[in-house]
Image (cartoon, rainbow, N blue to C red):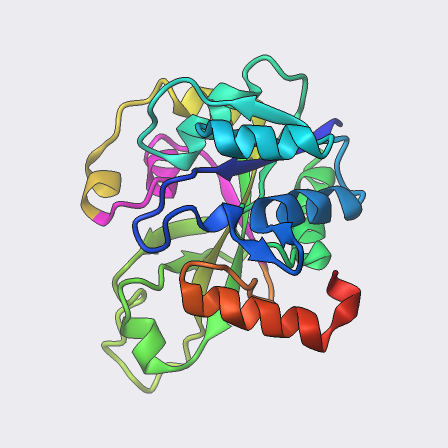
């Protein structure tokens, strides 16, 4: 089984323009993320996929592997699918470009799902973490997921799921963590499938997979990555490097 990591890297960002090229302890964020993915030694290959000449040159300058995204894409899956179409792989892991402090354990969990899936029934693997604070549970920016007894995803939503009609019932709520691993065949098929109503309504691309009958298996984690979405996040990341020099 050949497993590769793909790091989507857009230069433009509404909240923090050019964030992936910001300096973090003497290296750009995207370079740190790429090197961290390679350092896990979990992958047969690691690629950055970008629509930016600046990011392309940054990765190439330091000997990394990078693919130019040619087309405009509506979703991360579409962008990754274009990049890996001609790359030999069985499993494709999507690593977030703005998370330079990669958690190896989380990546191992999604990879393990496919290694244990001897019947080849799982199309995608992803992560979820328990949430208990009602402010987070009700926050539409925190995507929730419900699963069956085999940890297969039943639905993802920005709404509260399940709805607590009976507050006496003990229910554990889970927030979806956006690390994905795909079977390459399922990823390529995604690009041929028209968007349907659930995805259009919730603006969650993982619902397209469910609407077309794809199987998504979830693994539970208690480690949520440190994403850099704002200037404030970058300052926190710099302080983290100062506090833990081994992260350099």
First to last magenta residue range: 202-219
Q: Is residue 50 visible?
A: no
Left or right, residue 77 beside residue 158: right
Q: Could you say which quadrant of the image residue 219 lies in?
A: bottom right
Could one spot residue 118 in this view of the protein? Answer: yes
Residue 210 drawn in magenta: yes
Residue depicted at 67% across the width and 22% down the height: 89
Left or right of 246 on screen, residue 58: left
Which residue is located at x 28 percent, y 59 percent? 158
Residue at image location 48% in from the left, 59% down from the top: 228
Which residue is rendered at x = 60% and y = 35% of the image? 58
Above or below — where is 52 with respect to 216?
above
Q: Position of residue 199 (x, y in %)?
A: 26, 40
Note whether 239 is above or below 104 in the view shown: below
Residue 236's place in the image compared with 146, above or below, is below
x, y percent for residue 101 = 64, 59
Identify the image quadrant of the N terminus: top right
């Amino acid at each position: 089984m050949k497993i590769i990591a793909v790091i989507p890297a857009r230069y433009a960002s509404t909240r923090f323009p050019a964030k992936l090229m910001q300096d973090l302890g003497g290296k750009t964020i995207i370079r740190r993320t790429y090197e961290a993915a390679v350092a896990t030694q979990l992958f047969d290959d690691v690629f950055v996929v970008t629509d930016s000449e600046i990011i392309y040159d940054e990765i190439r300058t330091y000997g990394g592997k990078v693919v130019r995204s040619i087309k405009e894409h509506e979703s991360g899956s579409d962008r990754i699918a274009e990049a890996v179409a001609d790359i030999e792989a069985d499993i494709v892991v999507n690593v977030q470009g703005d998370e330079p402090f990669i958690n190896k354990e989380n990546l191992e969990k999604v990879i393990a799902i496919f290694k244990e899936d001897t019947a080849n029934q799982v199309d995608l693997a992803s992560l979820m973490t328990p949430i208990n604070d009602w402010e987070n549970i009700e926050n539409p920016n925190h995507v929730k997921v419900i699963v069956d007894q085999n940890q297969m995803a039943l639905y993802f939503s920005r709404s509260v799921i399940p709805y607590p009609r009976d507050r006496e019932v003990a229910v554990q709520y889970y927030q979806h963590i956006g690390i994905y691993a795909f079977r390459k065949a399922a990823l390529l098929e995604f690009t041929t499938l028209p968007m349907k109503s659930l995805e259009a309504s919730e603006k969650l691309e993982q619902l397209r997979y469910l609407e077309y009958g794809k199987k998504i298996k979830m693994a539970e984690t208690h480690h949520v990555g440190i994403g850099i979405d704002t200037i404030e996040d970058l300052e926190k990341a710099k302080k983290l490097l100062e506090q833990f020099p081994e992260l350099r």
